[in-house]
Amino acid sequence: MWKRHGKAADLVVSARRGAMGLAVLGMALFVVHSLVARWQWERDAVVELCVDGAEIESLTDHNDESTWRLLETVRESGVSSVAVYWDPTRPLSDLMGEWAPRVPDGMSLTLRPEPVPFSDWARGWPRTARPLKEGPPVRNVLFSGLTVMGYPDLSLVKEWLAVTDSHLPWVEFGRQRGMAALQAAFANRVVRAHSLTEEEMFLASPSSVVGRLRRAVRERGARFLYVRLLPGFPRAENEAFVARLAGALHADGYRLGSAVARYGDWPAPLVPLSTGLRQFLAFCVATGIPLASFFWALRRRSVVQAVLGLAGGAVAAGLLVAALLATPSFALGFSVFRGVKLALLLPLGMALFSLYRGDEIRHLLQENVTVGRLVLGLFVIGSVAYFVLRIGHGTVADASGMELLVRGHLETLLGVRPRFKEFLIGHPLLWFGFYLRLRLGEGRGVLPLGRRSFAQALRFFFHDARPFLLAGFIAPLSIVNTFCHAHTPLGVSLVRTFHGVWMGACWAGS
């Protein structure tokens, strides 16, 4: 009887192990398939340059022949389309007839319909929207203004777009009302685009403009660049500016031509998951695996094993997040990972309460407030607030001019710059924290003994490794956060992480 019970128990254990093995194998296949599909999709190397037709005309005094020559010059540099503004109360064929003698062969038009409030443009529709049968082709439609023409009723616009094959460049970080509805209706035609506003062009130098446009292509997957000319600069310098941008993109390994809308080219998923479920699973992975890796690292006695194991766990979590977000909707930016701040703060909070007991926290809160403790507390609160504000773009804690300068130098030197909070803060603090924890555990300090105030102050700050470990935990969380940006190519995220790890180790060793 006991033998029968033993055999049954062995069968249960074997069944559990088999089920676990199948689950791990299935997850591995899902991750590999998703990452390979994403990697192949991101290999698209064709970038389209489009110049603003109104700015071209202002440089040529609205002379057709001079406009043609300037467009031919930039076409030879690599520009493949010119943007023209269209008032929909005016027949489209008239506009195209005007531009036909100005546009050289091999160059297409990017139509920019303008919103016309308080007009009856819809009454002449679709007669006014019929293009000219001959002349330069209309390859792209990029709506101008804060709203799409016709918003909120886009029925006529959708009917018009349905009978064309024009691409829809979507300018990242834009807030154009009505564009989301067109993205959903014509996803197969959307191309991720980038542009600087006229206000930004007035404040930027030619070098910074080129750098920003290159970064948009290399790090955020933009394949349509709306190139504004340098305001106040003569024609020759603008020609040189366009040629410089084209040369930089060529040097980065990209080909200049007409952008391809590739939403429909994404391979079919191995397991169909809804966007909401992908978001939820990615959030669970982004918070759970780094925290489990942190607890694992705390049990290691080797500093190298703890730090590198924690970084490896973060990379594994990042790749799993990247696999879950491997869809064209995330890659193009239609859908974004929600909960970026929470995915960073929640593991930090859980790590805090695991490192410190409840009575320690209560004792700290009940202690008398001194000037030194008040200053230290304000510094900690300010650091946390600054860290939270720096998560994302467009905050009051945006990068300073000095930081932008250092970023530029790192980018020039390394190609892809690492994150400051990884190589400058997180990784060095992890190395020091685990080293200090090992030394204190062996009963050996890292500072000389003494009764002077300076020595006592140093011992106060370095008598406990936990604050350094908690602050250093920012590094693996930042690694996972890097992979949460699904529009960033996978190769860029891997290189950024690699640079952060080795530079952080060098900084800690120094």
Image: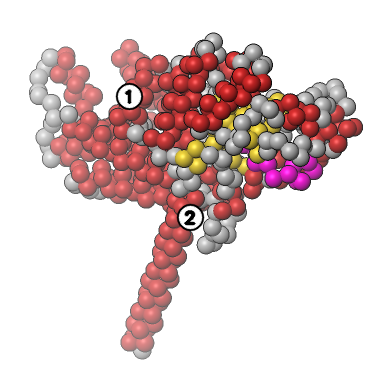
The mark nearer the N terminus, 1 or 2, is 2
Q: Nearer the viewer, residue 114 or 24?
A: 114
Of the pair 397 and 331, the residue shown nearer to us: 331
* Residue count near mark 2 (Cα–Cα under 10 Å), binned few <14, some 14–19, many ≥20: some
Any part of residue 358 in sight:
no
Instruction: Name which residue lies at 26% across and 34% down.
Output: 504
Q: Residue 486 placed where, x, y %?
A: 49, 43
Label 1 SS: helix
195 up-or-down from 485: above or below: above
Q: Is residue 176 magenta?
A: no
**Would residue 128 be found to the left or right of residue 287 on screen?**
right
The crowding category of the residue bearing disc 1, from other C-alpha atoms within 10 Å (few below 14, some 14 to 19, many at least 20), is few
Q: Which residue is identified by label 2?
A: 37
Judge left or right: residue 314 versus residue 129: left
Q: Residue furthest top?
A: 232
Q: Nearer the viewer, residue 304 or 352?
A: 304
Q: Quadrant of residue 440?
A: top left
What's drawn in magenta, residue-wise? 159-172
View extreme (left): residue: 449
Query: From this viewpoint, which residue is outermost toward the front?
Result: 65
Pinpoint residue 211: horizontal percent, then vertical percent: 43, 26
Depicted 187 relative to depicted 256: above or below: below
Task: Identify residue type, mark 1.
Answer: His
Mark 2 lies on a secondary structure that is helix
Q: In this view, which residue lies farthest toward the bottom? A: 1
Residue 419: x and y, percent? 36, 32
Q: Residue at x 82, y 30 (%)?
A: 91
- The image quarter in which residue 55 lies: top right
In the image, residue 163 lies in the stretch drawn in magenta: yes
**Residue to which mark 1 is pinned:** 409
**Alpha carbons under labels 1 and 2: distance apart:** 33 Å
Rendering coords of residue 257 (x, y %): 53, 39
